[in-house]
Amino acid sequence: MANSLNGRKIVLGVSGGIAAYKAVELLRLLTKAGASVHVVMTASAKKFVTPLTFATLSGHPVYHEIFDSEHSAAMEHLQVSENADLLIIAPATANTLGKLANGLADDPLSTLFTGYDGTVLVAPAMNDKMWAHAAVQENIRKMKRMGVHVMNPELGELACGVTGLGRLAEPADMVREIQQLLAQQSDLQGIKFLVTAGPTREHLDPVRFITNRSSGKMGYAVARQAVKRGAEVVLISGPTHLEPPPGVQLQPCQRAQEMYSLVMKHLPDCDVLVMTAAVGDFSPAEVQKEKMKKSDQPLVLHFLPTVDILQAVAAKKTGQFVVGFAAESENVVQSAQEKLKRKQLDLIVANNISAPGIGFQSDNNQVTLIDSAATIEALPLMSKVEIADILLDRIKSKIAPSS
């Protein structure tokens, strides 16, 4: 696996903690494996290891000053990360994590981070009480929601003399994680994804409609991560407030019938359909042309079932791998298994919408993956971005088991 780093450009960010000495060994291992490593340091990091050490071992200048550098006028914070395959920050101190998570950019490392849009891996290291602090954990959650990969610290002897959770991961383990992330960057290349996301809206009159609470965050996360991993992605989206992920072909819609038409149009050209959208089950039998006036009398509306998109897909698919989602409030696994069989799905993602703090509108979720072979995989609470990557891993293993 060492060859996977050959010719790769990696930016190594070092912040000011005693574990900075491990960054020297990490640099050595990366360069030995053939990577071109460019180091960026905070001012505090220079108190532990000198820029000269990293410059000598890497063969490249070290970016450690925003101003007063001979390269400052050339936008050094952008040039260092240009065309980089990955940015790893090791060690990442509590202070640095706080800056990165909240968009602060007042030192070389945080400035470079805000200007880099590629794969990022952070490896925190700090005192165990600091690691457990609510503010640090919230910053970790924020970074995961951004799509940043986090390599949690290990249990071991810390600089303060106690044994606890906060020790920087070993350099060899970080190299393996980097290799895995780099391999993942193109593992879906050549695969065409069709992803649906968000709610649908069914209009009652010119100003009113019925909808649901879906935010579209899960579908947008799947689309974003699939593109990052080299896939071609068409995203069919109901109304959301989300920015379309870069690189996807966005197909907006509102009504269930519109989403059905778009799915049927793009289905023949896709390899994988991921149906995360919360499609409304009913639409009004008649849409009023004028705004309905308020009255003291009860308002009676008549609704008809909307088209069942997944059922229609089951009748039309020609070998596509189809993933459905099941938002349930009771008997979650059983209901999902029934839906998987009824809709002839290859995989279904089930979540309990009655659980607090997850599901609709949330950045996090706790789901169970169930495949057509009745394999059940319950995932812990995690960000929707993390769930998206795990889901893509499972899809890849099903459609390309030999790769």
Image (cartoon, rainbow, N blue to C red):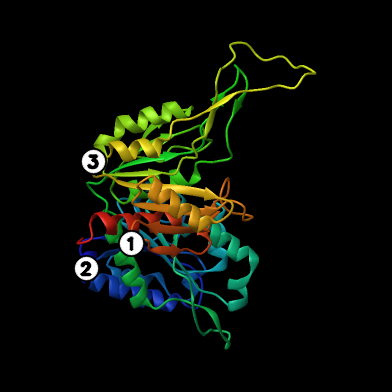
Using the image, determine if residue 197 lies above or below residue 340. above
Q: In this view, does 266 lie above or below 154?
A: above
Q: Residue 318 carries which label?
A: 3
Query: Which callout, 1 or 3, points at the residue further toward the start of the chain?
Result: 1
Q: Identify the residue under disc 2.
A: 34
The foreground one among 83 and 68 is: 83
Please tell me whether mark 1 or mark 3 is closer to you in this view: 3
Q: Of circles 2 and 1, which is in front?
A: 1
Q: Is mark 2 on a helix, strand or loop?
A: loop
Residue 239 appearing in the image: yes
Location of residue 108 in the rendering, given as x and y in whole percent from the top left corner = 46, 58
Q: Nearer the viewer, residue 373 or 167?
A: 373
Q: In this view, does 288 lie to the left or right of 217?
A: right
> What residue is shown at x 34% (from left), y 51% (from top)?
79
How many angstroms separate mark 2 from mark 1 (CA)? 16 Å
Above or below 20: residue 368: above
Mark 2 nearby-residue class (10 Å; few <14, some 14–19, many ≥20): some
Residue in the picture at 54% in, 41% down: 215
Question: Crowding near pointer 1: few (<14 within 10 Å), some, many (20+)?
Answer: some
Q: Does the CB distance between marks 2 and 1 fall below 8 Å?
A: no
Furthest residue to the right? 296
Among numbered discs 3 and 2, the one appearing first in the sequence: 2
Callout 1 amino acid: Leu
Q: Are marks 3 and 2 in contact (CB under 8 Å)?
A: no
Q: Is residue 70 visible?
A: no
| Residue 50 at x, y percent in the picture | 42, 73
Q: Quick one: label 2 or label 1, which is nearer the N terminus? A: 2
Quadrant in which the N terminus is drawn: bottom left
